């Protein structure tokens, strides 16, 4: 039965994930709407909140820990995240030279 | 003889379970490629969001509008999880009810988004106004198109569930669509943060 629970999640896991998601949505919202920090600190804080919420949803909603070993889905996801981070940060970095080549 | 038959049955059963987990792994791989699609759109947005051509800027986003959209989608992600729990309990009625609630929340989200896009267009902020708006409508619109697709997919699954009940096939399909739905909410977290919150900052 405990195996069954861990494979499909429980009401408790979903409620925990949901509550954390709401908190991690409200925190950045309050920070931004009340202009509570300097711009860079604010951007870093809300990005951290987004990444945390993404991780929480992976664990509590998408049950990334479940499934049998080896976890190819986790391997694929990590590879995908590496690609996405490379594409996004690489694009921002390379385009920061735009003014110098025009 | 008895033993060999039961061995055969359990072997067959095992093979079926493997097929199912293989199909779910296949769907995970699709989700990763979908991440790449959204990654390129986020990269485009990150590069172009300052190119507003003197028109509509992120400061003009409708704050109550996107906050409501965010919570509607978050709640729908939660209810799709509750649907999966009902499925594992074997409660077909509960499963279909939670799926319908998820579906209605998804439709509300799409409706709010269409309302947002239409009122922006009415103010003259269309997809061709500036590079910022081109990247904005492409990124947010692609997400909205995914949600719309998910709604029709879910309607199809509800019809199938009503006809066939909870079988190993429909179980797998519901597990897959719930992954898809949670994934769309995960993408929205980043749209909410990078596009809307950083826009109104």
Image (cartoon, grey):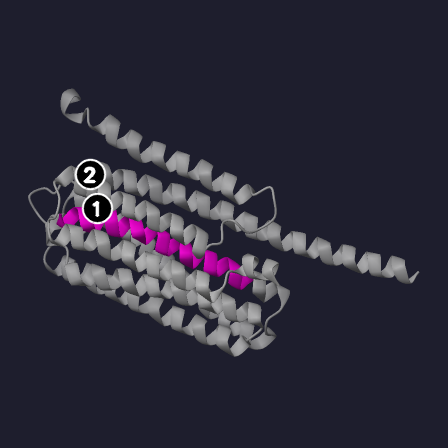
Q: Which mark is residue B48?
A: 2
- Whether residue B147 sits left or right of residue A64 in the image: it is left
Residue at the spot 28% in from the left edge and 31% down from the top edge:
A91
Image quarter hosting the N terminus of chain A: bottom right
Q: Classify B176 as above or below B48.
A: below
Which is more toward the observer, A95 or A1? A1
In this view of the protein, can residue B128 be seen by the observer? Answer: no
- Whether residue B116 sits left or right of residue A62 in the image: it is left
Question: x, y (%) of residue B193?
Answer: 24, 49
Q: Classify A48 as above or below B142.
A: above
Mark 2 belongs to chain: B
Mark 1 belongs to chain: B
In magenta segment, residue B13: no
Which is more toward the observer, B144 or B73? B73
Question: x, y (%) of residue B152?
Answer: 42, 66
Provide the secondary structure element on which disc 2 rests: helix
Who comes first in sequence, dot 2 or dot 1? 2
Q: Do the numbered discs 2 and 1 sit on residues whose CB atoms are within 8 Å?
A: yes
Residues rendered magenta in the picture: B173-201
Provide the secondary structure element on which disc 1 rests: helix
Total numbered labels placed on residues in the image: 2
* Mark 2, other Cα within 10 Å: few <14 / some 14–19 / many ≥20: some
In magenta segment, residue B188: yes
In this view of the protein, can residue A92 be seen by the observer? Answer: yes
User: Quick one: which residue is furthest to the front in this view?
Assistant: A2
Question: x, y (%) of residue A33?
Answer: 13, 54
Image quarter hosting the C terminus of chain A: top left
Question: What residue does disc 1 label?
Answer: B134
Which is more toward the observer, B54 or B74? B74
């Amino acid at each position: 039965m405990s195996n069954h629970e861990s494979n499909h999640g429980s009401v408790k896991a979903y409620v925990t994930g949901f509550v954390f998601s709401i908190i991690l949505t409200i925190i950045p919202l309050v920070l931004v709407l009340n202009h509570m920090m300097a711009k860079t600190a604010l951007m870093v804080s809300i990005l951290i909140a987004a990444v945390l919420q993404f991780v929480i949803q992976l664990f509590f909603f998408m049950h990334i820990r479940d499934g049998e070993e080896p976890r190819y889905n986790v391997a694929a996801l990590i590879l995908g995240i590496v690609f996405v981070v490379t594409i996004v940060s690489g694009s921002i970095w390379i385009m920061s030279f735009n003014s110098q080549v025009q | 003889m008895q033993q060999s038959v039961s061995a055969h049955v359990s072997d067959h059963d095992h093979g079926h379970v493997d097929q199912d987990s293989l199909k779910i792994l296949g769907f995970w791989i699709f989700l990763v490629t979908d991440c790449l699609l959204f990654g390129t759109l986020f990269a485009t947005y990150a590069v172009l969001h300052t190119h507003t051509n003197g028109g509509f800027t992120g400061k003009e986003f409708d704050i109550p509008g996107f906050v409501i959209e965010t919570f509607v989608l978050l709640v729908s992600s939660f209810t799709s999880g509750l649907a999966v729990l009902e499925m594992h309990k074997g409660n077909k009625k509960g499963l279909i009810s939670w799926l319908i609630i998820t579906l209605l929340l998804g439709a509300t989200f799409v409706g709010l988004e269409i309302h947002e896009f239409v009122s922006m267009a009415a103010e003259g902020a269309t997809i061709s106004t500036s590079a910022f708006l081109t990247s904005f409508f492409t990124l947010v619109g692609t997400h909205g198109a995914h949600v719309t697709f998910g709604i029709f997919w879910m309607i199809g699954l509800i019809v199938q569930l009503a006809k066939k009940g909870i079988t190993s096939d429909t179980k797998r399909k519901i597990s897959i669509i719930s992954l898809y739905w949670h994934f769309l909410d995960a993408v929205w977290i980043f749209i909410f943060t990078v596009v809307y919150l950083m826009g109104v900052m």
